[in-house]
Amino acid sequence: MSQHRHPGAPGRAGAVPALPDLPEATVARLPEYLRALHALADTGHETVSSEGLANAAGVNSAKLRKDLSHLGSYGTRGVGYDVTLLIEQIESVLGLTQCRSVALVGVGNLGHALAGYDGFASRGFRIAALFDADPSRVGEEINGLVVRHVDDLARVAVEESISIGVIATPAPAAQAVADQLVAVGVTSILNFAPCVLSVPEGVDVRKVDLAIELQILSFHEHRKASLTALPGGLAATDTQEAIGT
Amino acid sequence: MSQHRHPGAPGRAGAVPALPDLPEATVARLPEYLRALHALADTGHETVSSEGLANAAGVNSAKLRKDLSHLGSYGTRGVGYDVTLLIEQIESVLGLTQCRSVALVGVGNLGHALAGYDGFASRGFRIAALFDADPSRVGEEINGLVVRHVDDLARVAVEESISIGVIATPAPAAQAVADQLVAVGVTSILNFAPCVLSVPEGVDVRKVDLAIELQILSFHEHRKASLTALPGGLAATDTQEAIGT
DNA sequence: AGGCGCTTGTGAAGAGGTGCACAAATCGCG
DNA sequence: CGCGATTTGTGCACCTCTTCACAAGCGCCT
Ligand SMILES: NC(=O)c1ccc[n+]([C@@H]2O[C@H](COP(=O)([O-])OP(=O)(O)OC[C@H]3O[C@@H](n4cnc5c(N)ncnc54)[C@H](O)[C@@H]3O)[C@@H](O)[C@H]2O)c1
Ligand SMILES: NC(=O)c1ccc[n+]([C@@H]2O[C@H](COP(=O)([O-])OP(=O)(O)OC[C@H]3O[C@@H](n4cnc5c(N)ncnc54)[C@H](O)[C@@H]3O)[C@@H](O)[C@H]2O)c1
């Protein structure tokens, strides 16, 4: 039940990309494989085994093979995977063959760090525009980019063909900013504000909340403390515990 | 996600702390519920239904009820959940009743933003110490905290009873920093460097990689573009939205 | 007191993800 | 040219997570 229209999207009927409807869990791991592959390429490796790559990416080798098998058979049995070829394939699947332009809204404490980060460019993204609502911030230059007023979003978004929006404003402003981004045709949003965004169908939102990460760690810390507190019979590895009824 | 071990049998071996062995997916959502509950409390709500809270947290109401049922029965049928009581319960489970001390290593671009962020304190965390390896940065004061040299980690960690370490150094230094943190007894690490950390069993690592988030968005953007280009009769393909963390 | 509407808590079914284990495929070498 | 070593790709069983659907419980109103 999805009718996503892309305003002004050129009807490019390219039949080439046989896009293979990947499992979401696989998609989330591909970037990690990509990073590991680049590291391997930089150190002169031409091929890599699933075991080696899995190790570098911090996952199980069977999982890695299954993930890669979803893209097609790009490995050679008895040898492994061609590093360069695999990089090309993963980048193609992730849509990184074209450099994507990112708009960053909210150039405060966190926004400054993001704007000054060079790790995005090296991974296929270009921060194309910075926006803020505070007039005293507008005009400031960061890393060769001038901060513009958020009211210019519509114009600049088209000029720079923005495809991803990053929200780094305080939480109370985030929904309004999201609405503005959606209004200018942005369909992917990365949200740093600790709040839930409501967006129309067809728009993807990913959220990064550092406090949540810390709280999850806190839970495990709490649990570990409780476990060490109770002596009990440390009878080797008894991982079986039936909970069902 | 962090690699998770199976440390023996975490079942209900100990009857003292009534530690409820929660599903990992539930743990990851509890902080979101907590944030939504605080927002409700601030706006004067005394009770909330599963439907209302689920809405505020951006999840399914059945999922929310099942999550909360793992903590025990703290709702009242026909009425809903007592906001204050539920906050207490969740904070207790997450181990937030005591304020946890955080050490931040790497006070560069990103580290400055984190150190200056007041959103941690309001959610039960205290940034207790800042560390850097660059002598020119040591001594700098940020938000009332003095940057110390990373060699002082051992001493300060004990003094401040650090329970969580945050790594915001460049990737090549991250593993060494992680080793140092582990050496002084830290068993929970939040890593911002784009690399895999190797840590002993019993240490939890969570990773935040912004480039990965962007690449996942890029994939969906790519997929959406392909779908709009391919008309086809498949109007029933359900597009996924607002992917969870 | 009793009925009625609302909401929780949960059994069960289904969907999705994980990891083992192994057959199939490929290479190097004698 | 065949054989053994190596590694991929995948069927399968198991497990976790999600979602539906509904009985049980609670408060309120008559
Ligand atoms: N700083 C951190 O380390 C950190 C960590 C985790 C989460 N966050 C979250 O990131 C967000 C930003 O944090 P921060 O520390 O940079 O805050 P900040 O107050 O320093 O910066 C916010 C910026 O957004 C701008 N802004 C406000 N409303 C706007 C609007 N409608 N349109 C455009 N710009 C607008 C402000 O002018 C300001 O420059 C917050 O939601 C915060 O909770 C920050
Ligand atoms: N800036 C961002 O927005 C951003 C975004 C995503 C990821 N990251 C990642 O976060 C990390 C930090 O990024 P940054 O932009 O702040 O880099 P940065 O170079 O500005 O800061 C790194 C800091 O770490 C210190 N450092 C180096 N080695 C150290 C060691 N062994 N012990 C202690 N401190 C040490 C350096 O002195 C420096 O102050 C990097 O891994 C980067 O990839 C940053």
Image (tube, coloured by chain):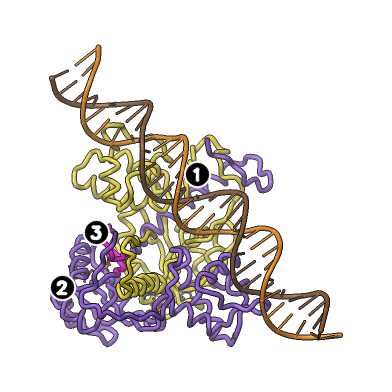
Chain colours: A purple, B yellow, C orange, D brown
Q: Which residues are magenta?
A: A188-204
Residue type of the residue flagged with mark 2:
Asp
Disc 2 C-beta below 8 A from ligand 1: yes
Chain bearing tag 2 is A
Cα distance in 3D space between marks 2 and 3:
24 Å
Q: Is residue A189 magenta?
A: yes
First along the sequence among labels 2 and 3: 2
Q: Quadrant of the N terminus of chain A?
A: bottom left
Q: How dense is the environment of label 2, judged by Cα within 10 Å: few (below 14), some, or many (20 and up)?
A: few
Residue A198: which disc? 3
Q: Is residue D13 found left or right of B73 in the rendered image?
A: right
Q: Position of residue A48 (x, y in %)?
A: 61, 79
Asked if the residue at tag 3 contacts the one at tag 2, i.e. Cβ–Cβ closer than 8 Å, the answer is no
Q: Disc 3 vs disc 1: which is toward the camera?
A: 3
Tell which subunit mark 1 falls on: B
Picture coordinates of residue A92 (x, y %)?
43, 79
> Which disc number belongs to residue B199?
none
Decide which of A38, B159 is in the foreground and name it. Answer: A38
